Image (tube, coloured by chain):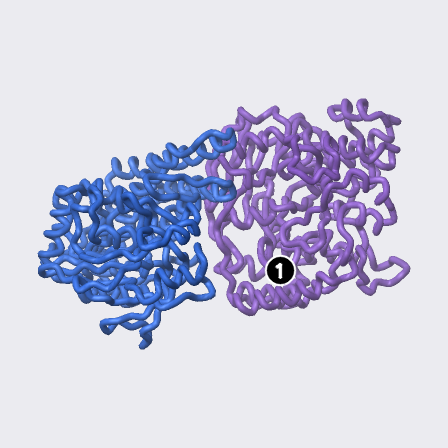
Amino acid sequence: MEYLTSNKVAIVDLGTSKIVHEKLDEALVREKIGGAGVTCELYEKYKEEDPIILGTGLFTGTLVPASALSMITAKNPSTGKVCHAPLTLYAGMEMKYSGFDYIVIKGKAPKPMYLWVHDGIADIHDAKEIWGKNVWDATDSIRDSMGDALIQVLGIGKAGESGSDFGQVCINYWASGDRWGFGKLFGRKKLKSVALRGMSLLEIADPEGFVQACKELLLAVKNGPFAGKQGIAELSAEMGEDIRKWLEPIIHRHLSCFNTPFPTNTFVFLDEDPKHLKESEKNEPGFLITDVYGLLGFNKMGLSAQDSSALLRECARAGIDAVAVAELNQKAGMTQLEEIKRSFGDVKGPLEHLSKEPFSPWAPPAPMFADFALSPDGSQTADWWKRRQAMAYIFGIHPIFALMSPELTEEKLLELATMGTGLEFTPETLEQVVGDILK
Amino acid sequence: MKEFPSSPNPPLSPPKIGIFVGAGASHSWLWFVDLLDQWGLNDVRFINEKEILIGALEGVDSLMMSGGDTFAMARSLGAEGSRRLKHFIEEGGLYIGTCAGAYLPLRSSMAFLNQFNWINVKISNISRRLSESERGLFQEHACTPYGCEFVYHVAREDVLLEMEGGHQANGSKKVIAPLYGGPSMLPSEDMQAIATYRGFTEKTKFLVREDLAEKTLHGNIAASRKRMGKGYLYIFGPHFEHPNYPEANGILARIILREGKNRATRSFRPEPPSSKTGQSFFEEWRRELSHSRMVAFGLEMLPIRWMIGNKWYEPEKIRVFLEALWRRLNYLESGEGVDVTPEDQKGMINRLKETTGLLRTMKKEHDRAQSTNGLAEDLFLLLKKVASDFLTIYFRAKRTETVRAQA
């Protein structure tokens, strides 16, 4: 496989500390395209060894608008169902450039380890210095020891280490879309973190055509109905929960994931005035809100925006899913900031809206801002959402942005796939891959 | 991943080329590496001042002296180095000097430099040629101390040149090359001009007012040639070897091919590797090079530079070294192995690890607001050794491949 790829798959056995590099089979790409199409196949191949599959989409890290997504595919430790968790911000892109398109992590380490993946090298490192540390400190420790602040760290905190059902794999310091408790799976394998960094390049089969098509698509996409809107509160408002005035006083700025035209993340200042224009005096004056449902969960408990964001920050440090913390604490009648903070180790119980789909409910279940010509009675929405998420996870498109960009049609994505790889991908192939993923 | 491009038709019997990597050589010698690689001139060795003093020039037809710190070069070579260089040229060797390597043989009364004095020419970008008011126009970084005067630099990046003496690029006498502090010379009977400064382009960055830049450069000599005994000295103010200027590269490569084969030196005989490197060597090399690259990239984001000798070094120069190795790694990894003893392999890996360690320490010291100048000095010395060792292996593999293909 020559184009849009590092052409490498790493098979990591934590039990033996052996790592095998395999070439990415072009026949597999022809059949499964990429992303979840391939991670599902790799999961099946290694399923007896309870694998965690990290995978990139076909377009991840390219000029295709919103090509920010990589993913974790693994068995949900609570339900036993194979699911996909999105890796966005800059982690998805970094994985593509780390020199591997897919990483299979199997076995269980005899002692805490972390995986260091960079420029086509995958190494297992002893994690004794970071096991027991919170997500933030572990990220800092890895970055400091390597001397590079751009390393992207997928890591767990105390929740994942201690086997909480809601242990989350976080991205650097922030919450991810892991709604499946994959942090528990990491913890069970004694895998503290996967650190990613790469400075490699991607080749494109038809570079001029691909770049031109991406530019045209970006022009078409960026003037869509979301133009002029930004941030997590606008997402919330579009979902029918208008928290814009509630959140506004602490907003400092909005941030996009890699190459994504809509900033789905909002940075709030908690320890400094958000209107502070000079460089911050605090090392970390606030928090990047990446999960609208976590924020809404605390909002519904009657907490202030400041306290809700502070709780999100504590959840991220502990590596625990804020949605579960909010829902289960609300059920238990706890509404005070300090008692919620102390509850992380005891959060247990079933969640009301546990998704039956393989894709994370981190992405809202309906079109965002845009008109996808669905029937007004909502009867098509659930199937549309599944298919739209499947597209996002195959091609590596930001799963929330996929809900706001009708211009990213399946036909256009297939056309770009052919231009980028030089391989012919037909609608029939795509249909088959989507069917396999949703099976 | 793209391999580093090579000339499709390497010459059957390429000249033996030495590249100076000793004291004073900064990073631009790696541009010579790119040029020679591109043109299939792969009989290359890397030479420092100590090796010159023990006869290393006997093994080469041509010597490339790149940019850097002329004073450090002159000081390290000393009278004996000067004598050996002169002997090398007079016996039919070809000396190519760019920028600092071009200043070295020019007439000077300064200590150490006065041991060379092979070309009797006046440098036009020297401050005694300016009025007091004009001197005041120069920014600090546009001047280099030169005895009790300053060599000053009026423009950087592209300059437009007119070639003379039959040198052309694609049938045109006009060629563009980048200037990074190299000399501008007044006409002299002691040398033959081969390029004259004629103007600027949209990419020229002026360090002074454009009219003063024009006064300093326009009509003056940018490159010249002098016969010394059986050999030649070619000196270039602008960097004809810079990889982004293929037309200028072509002129320089043709000079090397035409003039650089006047000496009888030993021929290259490929031999099967006696202690073949395994994949583990290259994997370890890739691992450490990757570590170094990422820290070096991070340093480029910091407001930092170092004065080493008489020359400023920016963090970007670190990656010129590292990238030169990185983009050649795939070629060696996919080959049949190269002949490096286990001890040498270990030494090479250890030095690369030391490079990563130095870079990480520099980053930490900078974060703690501590000076990193001493560390930078060590780093650039180490980088030259790391890069020249690796590139020696690379060119040996290339040469072996060429010879076998031709057989």
Where does the image place residue B156, in percent across and percent down from the top left? 41, 57
10 Å crowding of disc 1: few (<14), some (14-19), many (20+): many
As rendered, which of B229 and B33 lies closer to the eye? B229
Nearer-the-camera pick, A303 or B297:
B297
Q: Position of residue B12 (x, y in %)?
A: 19, 65
Q: Chain under label 1?
A: A
Mark 1: which amino acid? Val
Judged left or right of residue A99, residue B5 is left
Q: Residue at x 58, y 49 (%)?
A: A93
- In the picture, one chain is blue; tell me its letter: B
Task: Report the residue marked by disc 1.
Answer: A64
- Residue B81, can we see it? yes
Residue A329 lies in quadrant: top right
The image position of residue A74, as x and y in percent, is 64, 42
Instruction: Please indicate whether residue A50 sits to the left or right of residue A235 in the image.
Output: left
Residue at image coords 34%, 48%? B27
Q: In the orientation shown, which residue stands out farthest toward the right? A: A377
